[in-house]
Image (cartoon, rainbow, N blue to C red):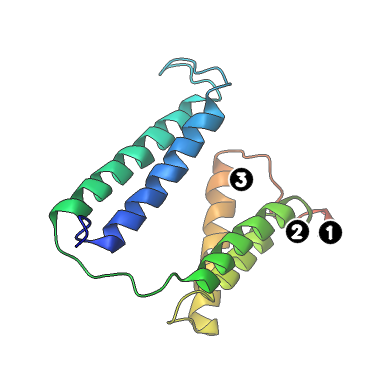
């Protein structure tokens, strides 16, 4: 008999803690700054701490509440999401944020059992427009909407 009563929450919590601790580990060599004058470590440290806390809560919850067992690890689906994220990082400078977002949403969408091209493409285009307007135009993020590959 196992002490983990909810394996799904346990493994989700484990992943949250792993990513959170990884962010904390990477941020430790940067200047933290203050709440009014944030340094480069401020955001990853706060995010890492929050992810770790969510992970701890989820793991503790998995020990206390009954849940469903995990039948299989969705390796193909995880590979699609991770691969789409890596491809986004590779494409964003050359193709621009708009094209990269569309590629990210469409490839990671293939991981869903509910994937249909038209609705996902609509969401992808909507996200590309929203992110371009908010992050590039309004906040001044130094990323091209359409990159050098398109002559911009």
Q: Position of residue 125 (x, y in %)?
A: 57, 68
Instruction: Please state if 4 lies on the left or on the right of 45 as rendered.
Output: left
Point 55% across, 42% down: residue: 138
Q: In the image shown, does 29 or 112 lie closer to the viewer?
A: 29
Q: Position of residue 142 (x, y in %)?
A: 68, 39
Does any portion of residue 109 appear in the rendered image? yes
Cβ–Cβ below 8 Å for labels 3 and 2? no
- For marks 2 and 1, the one nearer the N-term is 2
Tell me the number on the disc at residue 87: none
Could you tell whether 85 is left or right of 64 in the image? right
Secondary structure beneath dot 1 equals helix
The relative height of residue 30 versus residue 16 in the rendered view (above or below) is: above
Foreground of the two, 47 or 96? 47
Say what secondary structure mark 3 lies in. helix
C-alpha gap between disc 2 and disc 1? 6 Å
Q: How many C-alpha atoms fall within 10 Å of the one at disc 1: few (<14), some, or many (≥20)?
A: few
Q: Is residue 72 above or below residue 6?
A: below
Which is more N-terminal, label 2 or label 3? 2
Residue 50 position (above or below residue 92): above
Q: Residue at x 48, y 80 (%)?
A: 119
Q: Quadrant of residue 52?
A: top left
Q: CA distance from mark 3 to mark 2?
A: 15 Å
Which residue has dot 2 on it?
Answer: 95
Q: Which residue is mark 1?
A: 149
Location of the N terminus by quadrant is: bottom left
**Residue beneath label 3, please?**
136
């Amino acid at each position: 008999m196992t002490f983990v009563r909810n394996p799904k929450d346990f493994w989700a919590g484990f992943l949250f803690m792993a990513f959170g601790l990884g962010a904390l580990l990477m941020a430790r060599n940067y200047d933290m700054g203050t709440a009014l004058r944030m340094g480069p470590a401020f955001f990853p440290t706060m995010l890492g701490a929050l992810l770790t806390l969510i992970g701890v809560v989820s793991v503790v919850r998995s020990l206390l509440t009954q849940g469903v067992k995990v039948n299989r690890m969705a390796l193909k689906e995880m590979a699609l999401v991770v691969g789409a994220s890596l491809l986004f990082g590779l494409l964003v400078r050359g193709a621009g944020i708009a094209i990269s977002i569309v590629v990210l949403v469409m490839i990671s969408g293939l991981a869903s059992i509910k994937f249909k091209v038209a609705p996902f493409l609509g969401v992808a285009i909507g996200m590309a427009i929203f992110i371009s307007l908010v992050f590039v135009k309004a906040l001044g993020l130094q990323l091209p909407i359409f990159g050098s590959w398109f002559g911009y």
